[in-house]
């Protein structure tokens, strides 16, 4: 097939969507398909970014919404050349642009599939009511139609699909749950160890818990720091805590640093990538993500791939798979829950921790191996195209 991947941005600093799309496209190309990526990035800003297949940046898009007439022109000239399009994300101009061009082409338009990537989660409705009201004004004439007319709306797990139905009235979509995940790293053990040891802010050999993700209120990092400090104050023997990830909100990051200022065993590592990231995950006692909303949590899958237990909230949508597999511990996304998360893990015996590590690898292989899940997605798209051709 000739496939079009539509993304708002290929910049990895904007979160996990671009990384997931890149990995998925890698396996699409490996399976013999042609893949083109189009974004509303400024070409100069992403000149060093490489994606499997072709990569075209037609921006810069205007504002965070990414309004970009150049994308309309590009789609008008090229959309009909593809067998199918995969739109990654909603609430931004690229999804609306694809819908509008598909409407113009009518019967000759290729089918498009929308991967919501958690952007229909009702958490945003509860947490940002003003933003939700603005989205509601936009919803009936734009995103509702984008989802309604998609050949299928794709979800990474059953939980995400169920939650999406709670966000907006008039919701109408042909839903399909598809897998998602990551892949084992290409780096050798020595490469991962060496890269991480050069960056690790903790004393070499000191056990640590790892938070890996954007420093954003949605991720619950403040709860983690508070719970960690409280337990330590109450006499609990604790491993070090490493917070690794890009700073997205200066005021929130300052708040975190103030909370952690009194404890020299809480470290801020900044954004880590490549071999160093995998080394950090491999050496951690556990990966902790007490997020208030997490569509998938690619870092959870990465931790499991390295045999590292995942300590997560029940707002990370793959919590059921983690809990049922015995690959980690799940609690509520509040201070009591995060405190319990740490206490439960620290109370495990060495044998129980070893079993959890083994279960983590088994959980990854069963649910989150990206090559397998991408092949399943490709099979679904091919089936949809075959069905359409029979009509």
Image (spheres, rainbow, N blue to C red):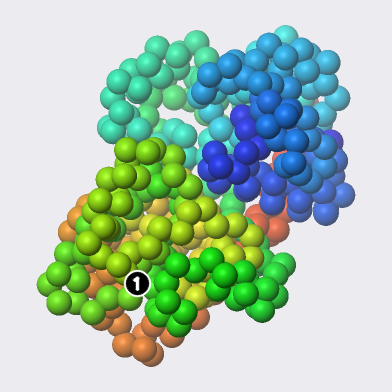
Image side of residue 55 versus residue 90, left or right: right
Q: Position of residue 84 (x, y in %)?
A: 76, 32
Q: Quick check: 301 above or below 40?
A: below
Specify the quadrant of the image occupied by residue 192.
bottom right
Q: Position of residue 163 (x, y in %)?
A: 39, 39
Identified at 40% across, 58% down, the residue is 268
Q: Quick check: 116 above or below 347?
A: above
Identified at 52% across, 53% down, the residue is 271
For disc 1, the marked residue is: 240
Q: Position of residue 248 (x, y in %)?
A: 44, 40
Identified at 37% across, 16% down, the residue is 134
Looking at the rendering, in which quadrant would you find the C terminus? top right
Local packing at callout 1 (Cα closer than 10 Å; few below 14, some 14-19, many 20+) is many
Identified at 77% across, 25% down, the residue is 110
- Total numbered labels placed on residues in the image: 1
Specify the quadrant of the image occupied by residue 349.
bottom left
Image side of residue 387 versus residue 243, left or right: right
Residue 200 at least partly seen: yes
Q: Which type of secondary structure does the marked residue at label 1 adopt?
A: strand
Image side of residue 114 versus residue 376, left or right: left
Residue 6 at least partly seen: no
Q: Quick check: 108 above or below 239?
A: above
Closest to the observer, 262 or 299? 262
Looking at the rendering, in which quadrant would you find the N terminus? top right
Q: Residue furthest bottom?
A: 351
Q: Quick check: 347 above or below 277?
A: below
Q: Position of residue 357 (x, y in %)?
A: 47, 79
Closest to the observer, 280 or 379? 280
């Amino acid at each position: 097939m000739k496939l079009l991947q539509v993304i708002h941005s290929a910049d990895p600093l904007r979160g996990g969507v671009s990384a997931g799309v890149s990995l998925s496209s890698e396996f699409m190309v490996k399976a013999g398909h042609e893949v083109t990526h189009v974004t509303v990035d400024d070409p100069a800003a992403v000149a060093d970014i490489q994606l499997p297949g072709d990569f075209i940046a037609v921006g810069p898009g205007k504002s965070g919404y990414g309004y970009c007439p150049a994308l309309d022109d590009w789609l008008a000239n090229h959309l009909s050349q593809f067998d199918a399009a995969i739109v990654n994300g909603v609430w931004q101009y690229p999804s609306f642009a694809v819908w509008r061009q598909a409407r113009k082409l009518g019967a000759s338009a290729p089918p498009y599939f929308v991967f919501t990537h958690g952007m229909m989660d009702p958490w945003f409705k509860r947490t940002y009511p003003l933003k939700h009201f603005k989205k509601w004004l936009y919803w009936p004439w734009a995103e509702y139609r984008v989802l309604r007319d998609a050949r299928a709306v794709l979800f990474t797990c059953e939980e995400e699909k169920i939650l999406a139905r709670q966000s907006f009235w008039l919701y109408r979509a042909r839903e399909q749950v598809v897998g998602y995940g990551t892949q084992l790293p290409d780096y050798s053990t020595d490469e991962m160890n060496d890269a991480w040891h050069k960056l690790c802010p903790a004393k070499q050999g000191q056990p640590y818990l790892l938070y890996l993700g954007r420093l954003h209120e949605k991720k619950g990092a403040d709860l983690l720091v508070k719970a960690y400090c409280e337990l330590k104050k109450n006499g609990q023997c604790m491993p070090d805590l490493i917070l690794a990830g890009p700073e997205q909100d200066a005021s929130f990051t300052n708040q975190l640093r103030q909370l952690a200022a009194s404890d020299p065993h809480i470290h801020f590592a900044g954004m880590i990538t490549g071999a160093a990231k995998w080394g950090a995950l491999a050496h951690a006692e556990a990966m902790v993500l007490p997020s208030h909303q997490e569509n998938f949590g690619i870092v959870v899958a990465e931790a499991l791939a390295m045999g590292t237990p995942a300590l997560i909230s029940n707002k990370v949508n793959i919590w059921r798979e983690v809990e049922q597999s015995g690959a980690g511990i799940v609690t509520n996304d509040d201070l009591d829950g995060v405190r319990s998360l740490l206490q439960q893990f620290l109370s495990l015996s060495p044998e129980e921790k070893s079993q959890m590590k083994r279960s983590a690898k088994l959980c990854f292989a069963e649910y989150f191996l990206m090559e397998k899940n991408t092949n399943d997605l490709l099979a679904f798209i091919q089936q949809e195209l075959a069905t359409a051709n029979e009509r």
